[in-house]
Image (cartoon, coloured by chain):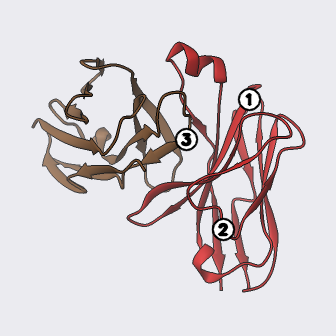
Chain colours: A brown, B red
């Protein structure tokens, strides 16, 4: 059974600073996803990471995947208030599976 | 193109009542999913469907039933609501071909906030 753990669960950071959210998963996952959720809103897809060493970037967010370590990271560069949200990572149960197992989420607050 | 829509947005039930949540998507997606989100728990998969007429259990299926009679609709039913089913319910959909290409993502609806008293 796939388990996905994120840390930290809460993150308060100042604007302009850098930080990393970590996502560990317990067994082989075919791919790794990152989603963003604003308060009271739905989930928005950020990244899909397929293979070892995959790196994707969008604006101030960069996601990477290390399948050997079963670790994905979401790096935030020079944080701005608009990035305040809850970020979820999710993995699949195995090759060919489309059932997602989510982490508990990291609530990010960017303060001036 | 409305994407994924959910009906209703809010609902309050008494213990033992029944209800059906409707999810509709206009993107011609093959796969559809129902999740529940509880505080501090992330999202958990209740049931999913890989095509019209098919359904399968997810991580937390007990107390729920689903049906997918039409490709664009996925219904989630609660036959006898319990306070433990108080949650926010999200529907999502995705393309199977995108999965094969490695470009897949699940598109989520706006959610239904359900309270069971």
Q: Earlier in the sequence, mark 1 or mark 2?
A: 1
Q: Quarter of the image for the C terminus of chain B: give it.
A: bottom right
Q: What element carries label 1?
A: loop
User: Residue A41 location in percent, x, y?
Assistant: 52, 50
User: Residue B55 location in percent, x, y?
Assistant: 76, 46
- Which chain contains the residue that carries disc 2? B
Q: Distance between the residues labelled 1 and 3?
A: 14 Å
How crowded pointer 3 is (Cα within 10 Å; few <14, some 14-19, many 20+) is rated as: some
Q: Distance between the residues labelled 1 and 2?
A: 24 Å
Which of the two residues, B109 or B28, is positioned nearer the viewer here? Answer: B28
Do marks 3 and 2 share a chain? no
- Pointers 3 and 2 in contact (C-beta within 8 Å): no
The quarter holding residue B72 reads top right
Residue carrying label 3: A99
Report if residue B15 is visible in the image.
yes
- Which chain contains the residue that carries disc 1? B
- Which chain contains the residue that carries disc 3? A
B88 left or right, relative to B47: left
How crowded pointer 1 is (Cα within 10 Å; few <14, some 14-19, many 20+) is rated as: some
Residue carrying label 1: B30
Do marks 1 and 2 share a chain? yes
Q: Distance between the residues labelled 3 and 2?
A: 17 Å
Q: Quarter of the image for the N terminus of chain B: give it.
A: top right
Any mark on residue B62, and which?
A: 2
Q: What element carries label 3?
A: loop
Q: Residue furthest top?
A: B101
């Amino acid at each position: 059974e796939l388990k996905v753990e994120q840390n930290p669960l809460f993150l308060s950071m100042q604007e302009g600073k850098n930080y990393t959210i970590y996502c560990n998963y317990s067994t082989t996952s075919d791919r790794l996803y990152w989603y963003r959720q604003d308060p009271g809103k739905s989930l928005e897809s950020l990244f899909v990471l397929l293979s070892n060493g995959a790196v994707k970037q969008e604006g101030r967010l960069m996601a990477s995947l290390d399948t050997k370590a079963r670790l994905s990271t979401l790096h935030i560069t020079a944080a701005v208030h608009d990035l305040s949200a809850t970020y979820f990572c999710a993995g699949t149960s195995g090759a060919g599976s489309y059932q997602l197992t989510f982490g508990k989420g990291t609530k990010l607050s960017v303060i001036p | 193109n409305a994407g994924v829509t959910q009906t209703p947005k809010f609902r309050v039930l008494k213990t033992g009542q029944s209800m059906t949540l409707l999810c509709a998507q206009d993107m011609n997606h093959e796969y559809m999913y129902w999740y529940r989100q509880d505080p501090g728990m992330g999202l958990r998969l209740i049931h999913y469907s890989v095509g019209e007429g098919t359904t399968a259990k997810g991580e937390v299926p007990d107390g729920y039933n689903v049906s997918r009679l039409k490709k664009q609709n996925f219904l989630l039913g609660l036959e006898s609501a319990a306070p433990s089913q108080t949650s926010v319910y999200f529907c999502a959909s995705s393309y199977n071909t995108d999965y094969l290409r490695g470009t897949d993502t699940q598109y989520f609806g706006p959610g239904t906030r359900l309270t069971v008293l």
